[in-house]
């Protein structure tokens, strides 16, 4: 190993929080917990020091980061004891979200293959139209996967379900479903275009403009 090689714990910390720049998944968790990025950076730096001092190991890193995130999460005003709802443990109650995002991921992967196949049949490379459409689909895939990874990270690192967590996950699931819907529309237009004697790209172009607007709006939200 070189003198600058990272330890397994340091590498795992980067997987969970990002390298020089905080990862989108870590930012999403911070946002869901009401933690600002400066505090998130401080948590990361604290973990770096704890790793260097052998206070925390690779195996205990996820538990430690969950603890620090929960310690720094914005607390809602306390209610009288009689009005307090019972605590909901995220490990079981968030399973519904985990199952849904995994199902959407499988659905998107299957539909992505279909639409790419149709684009290849409709516009043989190296046509400019082919490149434009493939770039649009690739952008959709990148944003979809970002929403998927962020949702799974929130589920993995969250210990208690809160209204804020629910809202964050529901937003990501809605974004994933909307992207799938646009891919469905594109698939239908390409099928019609392939079977039509009078081929026109106008409707397909409109769909791609809509998809671009969608991707831009999701990126802006994140």
Image: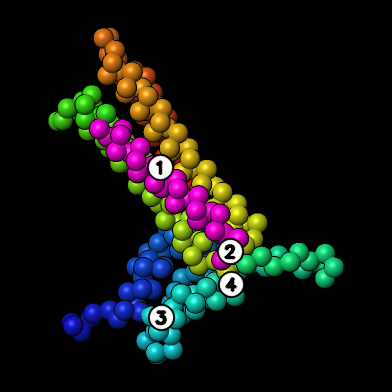
Dot placed on the residue nearer the N-terminal end, 2 or 4: 4
Residue 200: quarter of image: top left
In this view, which residue lies farthest toward the left?
Answer: 126
Q: Nearer the viewer, mark 1 or mark 4?
A: 1
Residue 92, label in figure: 2
Q: Main secondary structure of the magenta part?
A: helix
Regarding mark 3 in the picture, which secondary structure is present there?
loop
Quadrant hosting residue 23 = bottom left
| Foreground disc of the pair 3, 1 | 1
State which region is magenta. 91-117
Circle 3 residue: 59
Name the one closer to the observer, 12 or 43. Answer: 12
Q: Quadrant of the N terminus?
A: bottom left
Dot 4 alpha-carbon crowd within 10 angstroms: few under 14, some 14 to 19, many 20 or more: some
Does 14 lie within the magenta span? Answer: no
Task: Determine if residue 34 is in view.
Answer: no
């Amino acid at each position: 190993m070189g003198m600058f090689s990272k330890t397994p714990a340091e590498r795992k910390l980067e997987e969970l929080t990002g390298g020089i720049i905080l990862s989108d998944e870590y930012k999403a968790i911070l946002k869901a917990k009401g933690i600002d990025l400066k505090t998130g950076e401080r948590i990361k730096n604290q973990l770096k020091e704890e790793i260097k001092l052998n206070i925390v190991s690779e195996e205990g890193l996820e538990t430690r980061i969950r603890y620090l995130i929960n310690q720094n999460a914005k607390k809602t005003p306390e209610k009288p004891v009689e009005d307090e709802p019972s605590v909901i443990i995220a490990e079981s109650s968030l399973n519904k979200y985990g199952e849904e995002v995994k199902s959407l991921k499988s659905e998107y992967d299957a539909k992505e293959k279909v639409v790419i196949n149709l684009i290849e049949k409709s516009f043989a490379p190296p046509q400019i139209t082919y490149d434009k459409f493939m770039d649009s689909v690739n952008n959709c895939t990148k944003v979809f996967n970002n929403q998927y990874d962020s949702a799974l990270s929130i589920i993995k690192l969250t210990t208690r379900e809160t209204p804020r967590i629910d809202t964050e996950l529901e937003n990501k699931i809605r974004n994933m479903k909307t992207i799938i819907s646009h891919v469905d529309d594109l698939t239908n237009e390409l099928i019609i275009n392939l079977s039509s004697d009078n081929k026109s790209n106008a409707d397909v172009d409109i769909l791609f403009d809509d998809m671009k607007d969608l991707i831009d709006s999701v990126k802006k939200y994140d």
